Image (cartoon, helix red, strand yellow):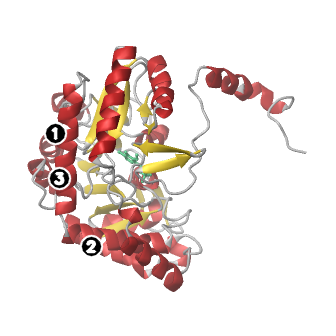
Amino acid sequence: MTLSSTGSALDRWGFAEWVAASKRSNELYDPPVLNGLNDAIVDIDGRKLVNFAGIGFLGWQHEPDVLTSFTAAAADFGLVTGGSRMTAGISQPHRDVESLLCEITGRERALTFASGLLANVGFVNAMSARFSFAGGLGVDNTDMVFVLDRDSHWSMWKAAEKFGIGRNLLTFRHNDTAHLRKVLEKVRGRRVVVGFETVYSADGTIAPIGEILDLCEEFGAVSYADDANGFMVYGNGQRRFAREYEDLRRATFLMMSFSKSVGLEGGAIVGPADAMQAFEMLSGTSMFTAAIQPPTASAIAYVLRRMLHDPAVVDNYLDRVDRLRSELTKTGCTINPTPTYITSIAIGSDEIAAQLRLDFAECGYLVPIFRYPAVKKNNAVIRLLLNARLSQDQLDGFIDTLAALKKKYDF
Ligand SMILES: Cc1ncc(COP(=O)(O)O)c(C=O)c1O
């Protein structure tokens, strides 16, 4: 017998009614089930769709030599670490990734996590922890103040839930350094961490990194830059946003995700050695949960080395993004003004957004729609990540379909 959610104590949670109503309005749906790879073309229910929804946009995860690195490490190190980092240990591939991250970012020590989300949650836990071993010398940072850009990722908000808004959680308007200054003035003299993202995934903006870090230095605040989206796309000799990424070298801590440009899964934080060693225990998310699987860690290290060795791959990709942006502008669509690789096409209405997802699928395109709660209500966007493995013909087909749907729904 399977238990259903009706006719039980669970009735009072309202899931059944909410699910039924949200499915009727196409707002809630079952995720697509892919037959085969999540690549530039995906097979869903026997239909081939051109895919704009994958976040591993450079496609390293499909390269034969990356797969070889993965399978060789699976044979050498097994599929799992077998427990948490502090009890079961990590494998050599984890150490390789951490050394490479220090080399790439010029930081003293790195700590990998099973995902970027766990890195963010762990950071906030660690920075606000009260802990001592058996009553010995400990840390008590429970009175710290967290100052966060308002458009920060869900994981940062989730992590900061225990903070009191206005007491030890303050926010500043998105990318607004004049407002950040005012907020910092209010908490002058206290222990402050300023958290922001480098590249914001919904609106594709880039933070005024240098100005934020100047303020952190002026007010004696620690800085935490979530570079989940920009990691290995910008910096490292890339000409776009070179000044911002040069400034980023001054951030106290830098966080990265391996699910974007690297195309795999996992996350990390880099920073000063003592703090990073403390985080290993105080984050909780490296202590009480499993690490990245060893073959994935090996593939991450492999991809990072290839990226360092061949920066032209990213450069060519960014050239293609520029061309796509200009094509989109020609259709009359409103796209985000900052020319990062994250392209969002404004739709507005949540209702139209829900319908568009279906219409695109009907026409053969799997297109990610960001709507509430990913963005504010009725600020829906098509969040386009150009998949580097799509051909120009496939992109042209998408532009034509977009133009037709734009006309139909007038967004
Ligand atoms: C800004 C930002 N931070 C953190 C994360 C979480 O990263 P991960 O997917 O590795 O958990 C994401 C993922 O979308 C993100 O965009």
The residue carrying mark 1 is: 208
- Residue 172, quarter of the rendered image: top left
Q: Amino acid at mark 2?
A: Arg
How many residues crowd around disc 3 within 10 Å: few (fewer than 14), some, or many (20 or more)?
many
Position of 50 relative to 263 (above/below): above
Q: Secondary structure at mark 2?
A: helix
Q: Amino acid at mark 3?
A: Leu
Work out which quarter of the rendered image holds the N terminus and state it.
top right
- Observer-nearest of 232 and 13: 232
Q: Secondary structure at mark 3?
A: helix
Q: Secondary structure at mark 1?
A: loop
Position of residue 203 in the picture relative to residue 24 (left or right) = left
Residue 241 position within the rendered picture, expressed as x and y whole percent measured from the top left: 13, 47
The residue carrying mark 3 is: 248
The residue carrying mark 2 is: 305
The Cα–Cα distance between marks 3 and 1, rounded to whole angstroms, is 10 Å
The Cα–Cα distance between marks 2 and 1, rounded to whole angstroms, is 29 Å
Residue 395 position within the rendered picture, expressed as x and y whole percent measured from the top left: 30, 41
Label 3 CB less than 8 angstroms from ligand 1: no
